[in-house]
Image (cartoon, rainbow, N blue to C red):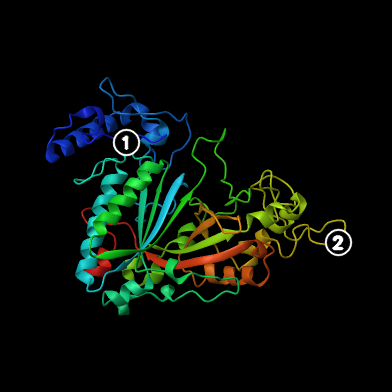
Amino acid sequence: MTTTASPSGGTAGSADHTGSERAETLELSRRRLLGTVGAAGAAGLVAGAAGGAIGVAAAQDGPPTALSTVGSTAVAFRDEHAKHQAGITTPLQARGHLLAFDLAPGADRKAAAALLRRWSRTAEELMAGRTPAADTGVALDAGPSSLTVTFGLGSTFFDRTGLTARRPRQLEPLPDFSSDELDAGRSNGDLWVQIGSDDALVAFHALRALQKEAGDTARLRWQMNGFNRTPGATASPMTTRNLMGQVDGTNNPKPSESGFDERIFVGRDAGSGEYAWMRGGSYAVVRRIRMLLDDWEKQPLAKQEKVIGRRKADGAPLTGGDEHTKMDLDKNGADGLPVVPADAHARIAAPESNQGATLLRRPFSYHDGFRDDGAPDAGLLFVCWQADPLRAFVPIQRKLDRGDALSPFLRHEASGLFAVPPAAVAGGYVGQPLLEG
């Protein structure tokens, strides 16, 4: 059931308030609620924390109730140590929106800089659980709920802003793959925004705020909405599952591993010249991959597991152990054939099969209703991160394209590649060194 706030912001005021009074009432109510975050405990404020009982918090006339762990968790807009934008190594959130914008005709470098400044300011406010000056009140009763907002730049952004000479070679268009059935209208774009949150209203609130602030500077090109399992929905933290029911993301590299930063974030390779603005940033490949779920669900369990190369129940490799046991790609069965088939998805995508090429997968599932034939229009909003897509995503996808047993059950329908600059410095905005350097 959906409830709608009254024009006065619920219980906080009467219907005859002026616009300024209503805005003040909304802000006071939100601040009063967010003041309870401290009562949730310091552990609830650690970036990316999850778990705990899912509770309900709302601004009432009586004493405020502390937010649950899910609501109180905040992620910093800028990390002065890591220098990376949020939403890359942040744990997966329950709700997500991916959007691409094109700069409007006549919008130049100065206009793009002003937009990114507005967006960065608004994202910082929202991620901290604060209410922007002009607000809709959609997320009035919620805490920050692990909100992250991440900004990226497409290849065409550099042409539109007169910065072609500063476009990195890593933004060269992705090659065509035989499995592609791409919709150009839902691919690429000048600007890319990734929004994630553990609360659907908080995510929508950020989406609406950023879309409004685009104003006359940029026009929405495409939008995709996704979801994951909500933190706390399982007895203990677990790797999420995709819509095929498979544990998805077991082999993801971890920030604690040696060489993680070199593989995922741009380092010294950025140089000190025209590409130095990307040092500490990363490259995001975005793919809308429809799953042919009706066909997949007809396959017997044993067939599904051979296609993936892992057990469906727990994600463990077919060669034995648990989910995190290293897959033995050299192990043969009693029939003399590899236990993990040669065309199994997990084998082909493994770093060991790709000269160490590594991706950080951070996807959302999606469901956009049903197609004319009754099949679900559902699948994966695949987002992966790397320091150089020409050395990571491209060779891995080429290999999958040539013989992945999972390919017959997938349709790649949209694609994009974006340069994601490092986090903004204090008082600055994302992309400032590029636009003002």
Outermost residue to the top: 62
- Residues tagged 1 and 2 counted as in contact (Cβ below 8 A): no
Mark 1 lies on a secondary structure that is loop
Q: Is residue 166 above or below residue 196?
A: below
Residue at label 1? Answer: 4
Residue 395 seen in this snapshot: yes
Residue depicted at 34% across the width and 26% down the height: 66
Front position among marks 1 and 2: 1
Q: Please state which of residues 346 and 186 is positioned toward the viewer in this rendering.
A: 186
User: How far is mark 1 from mark 2, CA to CA?
Assistant: 64 Å
* Residue highlighted by disc 2: 336
Q: Amino acid at mark 2?
A: Gly
Residue type, label 1: Thr
The x and y percentages for residue 238 are: 57, 41
Give the crowd class for mark 2: few <14, some 14-19, many >=20 residues within 10 Å. few
**Res. 275 image quadrant:** bottom left
Dot 1 or dot 2: first in sequence order is 1
